[in-house]
Amino acid sequence: MASLAATFGRGAMTNHWKDIKNADVVLVMGANPAENHPCGFKWALEARDENNATLVTIDPRFTRTSAVADKHMQIRPGSDIAVLGGLIRHMLANDLYHADYVREHTNASFLVSGDFGFEDGLFSGFDEAASAYDKTSWSYQRDAAGFVRRDMTLQDPQCAFQLLKTHYERYTPAMVARIAGCTEEKFLEMADIICSTGRADRVGTIMYAVGWTMHTVGSQIIRTAAIIQLLLGNIGRPGGGVNALRGHANVQGATDHAIVAEMLPGYMKVPTPAQTTLREYLDASTPTPLVADTVNYGGNSPKFFVSQMKAWFGDHATAANEFGYQYLAKQDGDATWLSIWDKVRQGDIEGFISLGFNSLLAGPDVPRLLESMSKLKWKVVIDPFLLDSAEFWRVPGMNPAEVQTEVMYMPTTHWIERDGSFTNSGRWVQWKEKAIDAPDGVRSDTYVLSELFWRVKELYLQDGEDAVYNEPIQNLTWDYLNPREPTLTELAKEINGYDRATGRLLSSFGELRDDGGTSAGNWIYTGSYTEAGNMMARRGTDDPTGLGMHHDWAFSWPLNRRVLYTRASADAEGRPWDSTRPGIAWNGSRWIGDVADYGATTPPGGPGAFIMTEEGVARLFSNHLVDGPFSEHYEPVESPTTNALHESVAVNPILNWYDGVRETLAAEGDDFPYACTIYRVVEHEHFVTRNVPLLVEAMPDFFVEVPEGLAALKGIENGGRARVWSKRGEVEGVAIVTKRIKPLLVNGQTVWTVGIPVHWGFVGITQGSMANLLTPYIGDANTRCPEFKAFLVNIERAEPRTT
Amino acid sequence: MVLEGAVSAASLCYCTRGMAISRRTFLKASVGGAVGLSALGFDLAPVHAAVRQLKIRNAREYKTVCPYCAVGCGTIAYTHGSGGLNTTSTVIHVEGDPDNPINGGTLCPKGASQMQLAISPRLRKSPMYRAAGANEWQEVDWDFAMDWFARKFKESRDNTFMERDAQGRTVNRTNGIAWVGSATVANEDAYLITKTMRAMGLTYIDHQARV
């Protein structure tokens, strides 16, 4: 999601599930929604069947989504940027882009510093010693007033549009074919379909999932897709967008509420040690406008932050104490998943709490993870089911006596025993009713948190004057009716926020103030629980636009807007690009249609459409990612071939290499000739479905998907067994010999790809190999999301089991 | 009237195409057919009606959301039980919510079998403790579990808390404890996790969005 924010201003699925029915072209890439999001995917089928849309898939496998698509193209795992870069070149070379949209709503006309450059796989500013880029040269040219210089003709060689054109010029169809393993003809056939939406009367959507995020270039793959959709004029419009299909019921909500290393609720940044005062923090996190007359909505950040601190610390957050700013921990460096386990490995982290999360099977590199986990002093696992994560000390082959970690397992309620809201992929926040009580002996997550809070707080009081710093714990607002188990309704209201003087629930984050007069636990949810009631529980089914927006159903952040960046759905005069599928339209006195993001009565012609960027427009050129203002194809850290664009810079040059990781990768001379990718099937939700008999019966065994020709080479039979191993671990299971993965001609050599499903472990009704025994301990340069989707293995026939 | 109510509550709407055929319409048609076909000299319709109403007789309806992926399919959970004091309700059936605009009553194989997740016999009912080096779990009560948790938490926080860094800047953090999860809890619990753990001084906080 980092790259969507870097391009558009917000890091979330731009449109929503039902909106997909409005598309003319649906590109599914890095996802397999027919299998993993079946009921959402039916809106893609609706588009195909009722809107005459063309549905295309690009994937290393012929998936169940491919099976119902009009066209499918197979590519090698990890070659996505080459294909997408090829699409950019194709639409620019053949004038297939939406020129009016690009001029009006993107930074195509912005002039970039003459110091910016790209050579032999490296952008300007590369610092090899620091393994980072100095981004100084990735900046705009400014005029005397400090605003960006522009060339509306898009002819200046330093304008973002021309730089973009130059950068992707190398991604010719021949180069795409060489890197991805497709043919030039097939690529061009796909390109013509995808680029057919670069006009006002057509619109296309892109659906992606972890098939894109889980790469060392994951953020840049998504950046490339975002650039494509801007060039085609498909952002902000019904039927358009870059749509991230998220995997867990509330993964969007948990991200919005910032169970995330680098964020506070509502996508505010975690403060750093260098920001020693509230003022310094706010100055660093409040964007200043780069053009005259722009909304720059991020300029309101101080109101959001102060209101959040009031929600957390109430009367203890005052102007005199910087609204409690010093209560917040200041983090140095990365604090995400891979870094956490690296610190555990070094012995720096004593205790680990895992709630609703199988922290062992999640990987990557389970052998390394196990070694680290065994160094913990204590671990707490909170989950309705007893799971591998709690029982890591008795993984088969491990001697429990050697694991000195104390472990506490606590059974807590699950969804049906609690009310509360889930936010789906498309930002719809739906309230759910509690259906049954929890059984005796089972407590809620809210109870566990509250008990922990009170007991720790009381222990600190007992310590008296010798206590370690605990002022924020003593001053944390906890004024719930039952302080040992708040209701989720109380918490929902706290998240929404109040006018503190009157106690009135706020109806919009437009009401938030930076003087302490308002509170809001998470500003993007303000409006979800107002004086009119619980907006998330609304069940109105009317759809007056016919576009599936359903404004009376549940609540959609922000402010019940159904499609993000709605202003971009219309031209400079406020007329919808396509009158049959309007997002919003200016009727002479106000915007009608979806909830306007632009001010309901602000006339067109003024500020730019993308209110969350300092530019007021979306960014074709963006300095918000760490590894380049444009994307570039780099090979996975384990690749079956060299980088055809620049052999000397094969992989992303600014990855973070944790201690000892290089030694766990296939090296020259090692025999790991095959590409491997990991995926899921419809019967599985990560790991929890191992507890459901019907699903276990439907998909009982761990398996290995082996292409026909490779199976023949290795003597592996369909239904027989196969062993697969990487430099890190090995798995064994039933062989499924398949036509779904073909050998590809990559860079002049044949590349085979093997597929492995992720699901099994040693706990559950069914047991089987852990897919993440194989995967490498390396993450994306921006998000550190691990590279689960492309690595190297070897494979051989295994003998039938005797038991 | 009984039939109307029963089928309405359980109706599945296959309305993804221009022409909507609901199960209500379908059943009306088939019940009508049964009347027409009856050669037994009595009306079979009440028999069919009785069969249809069995499953949800006395059931309560709760509108909830599927716990699996992030499509957010609406579901209806049917429970049995009087709802009175000292009684226990149980889920007898879960199906797609036909009113929900996202899924229009449909569910995938996971969603359709979610009742087996909701009331699985594999769900645990007691905290358990595993001592250092031990081979087995031992059941403990909640008071013991929470007391142990709070003491361990505070001990590690005390051991590792840093008020100022090497450059003398206020950081007020503990890098000795990590919290992960969860993408499966409600928003309100997710918010409370962040609020509580940030106030405790943790910075190692992450969830499934990363992996």
Image (spheres, coloured by chain):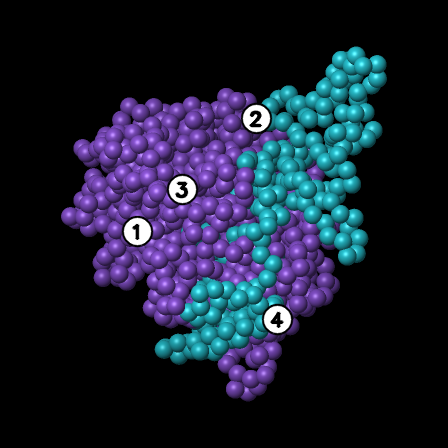
**Disc 2 with disc 4 on a shared chain:** no
Q: Are marks 4 and 3 in contact (CB under 8 Å)?
A: no
Residue bearing the label numbered 4: B143
Q: Is residue A673 left or right of residue A345?
A: left
Q: Looking at the image, is mark 3 or mark 1 earlier in the sequence? A: 3
Percent across and percent down for residue A171 are 26, 35
The chain coloured cyan in the image: B
Percent across and percent down for residue A10 are 49, 48
Residue at 77% x, 57% y: name it: B86
Give the CA distance from mark 3 to mark 1.
Answer: 16 Å
**Disc 4 with disc 3 on a shared chain:** no
Q: Residues within 10 Å of mark 2 (few under 14, many from 20)?
A: few
Q: Please, which chain is the residue tagged with disc 2 on?
A: A
Residue bearing the label numbered 2: A580
Q: Residues within 10 Å of mark 3 (few under 14, many from 20)?
A: many
Residue bearing the label numbered 3: A702
Residue bearing the label numbered 1: A729
Give the CA distance from mark 2 to mark 4.
Answer: 62 Å
Q: Nearer the viewer, mark 2 or mark 4?
A: 4
Give the CA distance from mark 1 to mark 4.
Answer: 41 Å
Give the CA distance from mark 2 to mark 1.
Answer: 55 Å
Percent across and percent down for residue A35 are 47, 35
Q: Do we see residue A123 in this rendering? A: no
Q: Give the colour chain A carries in the figure.
A: purple
Give the CA distance from mark 4 to mark 3.
Answer: 40 Å
Q: Nearer the viewer, mark 2 or mark 1?
A: 1
Q: Please, which chain is the residue tagged with disc 4 on?
A: B
What's the residue type where badge 3 is placed? Phe
